[in-house]
């Protein structure tokens, strides 16, 4: 994870002077632009710090080493539900929420309700039905 951490840290450091230059170009009157660039910098530095911490804790992965073999990365990578429809419902809820931000606030509340239903369904999909544990 060292490469990912360095990449995010580099991007975060890059956006600091970009935000300063942008601030000078607009004479610090347009607050959204330079504040957004500073926030992007802060967020990418936070992600880079997390990846650096996780990389130090977990150790080098096979893809981090030059001498690694392909078979070292094989095995279980996680548990994924190939038949689950809840991610699609959650994506529709997010799209509805963003539409609500652009078109009308009442649509945002519909998206939030649909998101709550989708999250509960996704979390508890292995607690009931054919695939219950």
Image: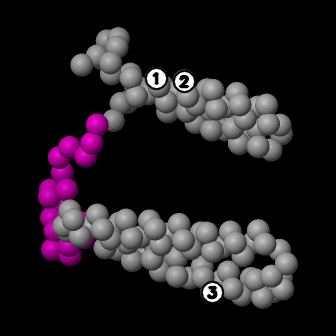
* SS at circle 3: helix
Task: Name the residue rendered at 66%, 73% in the picture.
Answer: 37
User: In the rendered image, which quarter is residue 22 located in?
Assistant: bottom right
> Residue 57 placed where, x, y %?
21, 65
Query: Residue under circle 3?
Result: 17
- Distance from disc 3 to disc 1, alpha carbons, whole Å, reads 44 Å
User: In the rendered image, which quarter is residue 52 located in?
Assistant: bottom left
Task: Name the residue rendered at 27%, 42% in the picture.
Answer: 78
Q: Earlier in the sequence, mark 3 or mark 1?
A: 3
Q: Given the current orientation, which residue lies at the most extreme top position?
A: 129
Read off the magenta span.
Answer: 62-79
Query: Residue under circle 2?
Result: 117
Does 77 appear in magenta?
A: yes
Query: Residue under circle 1?
Result: 121
Depicted 5 relative to depicted 102: above or below: below
Q: Are the residues at dot 2 and dot 1 in contact (C-beta closer than 8 Å)?
A: yes
* SS at circle 2: helix
> Residue 82 placed where, x, y %?
37, 30
10 Å crowding of disc 2: few (<14), some (14-19), many (20+):
some
10 Å crowding of disc 3: few (<14), some (14-19), many (20+):
some
State the quadrant of the C terminus: top left
> Residue 85 placed where, x, y %?
48, 25
Magenta span: chief secondary structure: loop
Does 58 appear in magenta?
A: no
Q: Is residue 48 left or right of residue 1?
A: right
């Amino acid at each position: 994870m060292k490469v990912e951490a360095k990449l995010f840290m580099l991007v975060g450091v890059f956006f600091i002077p970009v935000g300063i230059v942008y601030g000078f170009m607009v004479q610090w009157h347009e607050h959204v632009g330079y504040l957004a660039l500073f926030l992007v910098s802060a967020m990418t530095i936070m992600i880079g710090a997390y990846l650096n911490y996780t990389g130090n804790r977990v150790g080098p992965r096979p893809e981090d080493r030059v001498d690694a073999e392909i078979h070292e990365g094989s095995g279980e990578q996680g548990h994924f539900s190939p038949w689950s429809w809840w991610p699609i419902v959650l994506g529709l809820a997010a799209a509805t929420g963003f539409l609500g931000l652009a078109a009308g606030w009442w649509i945002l509340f519909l998206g939030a309700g649909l998101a709550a239903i989708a999250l509960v369904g996704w979390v508890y999909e292995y607690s009931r039905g054919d695939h219950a544990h």
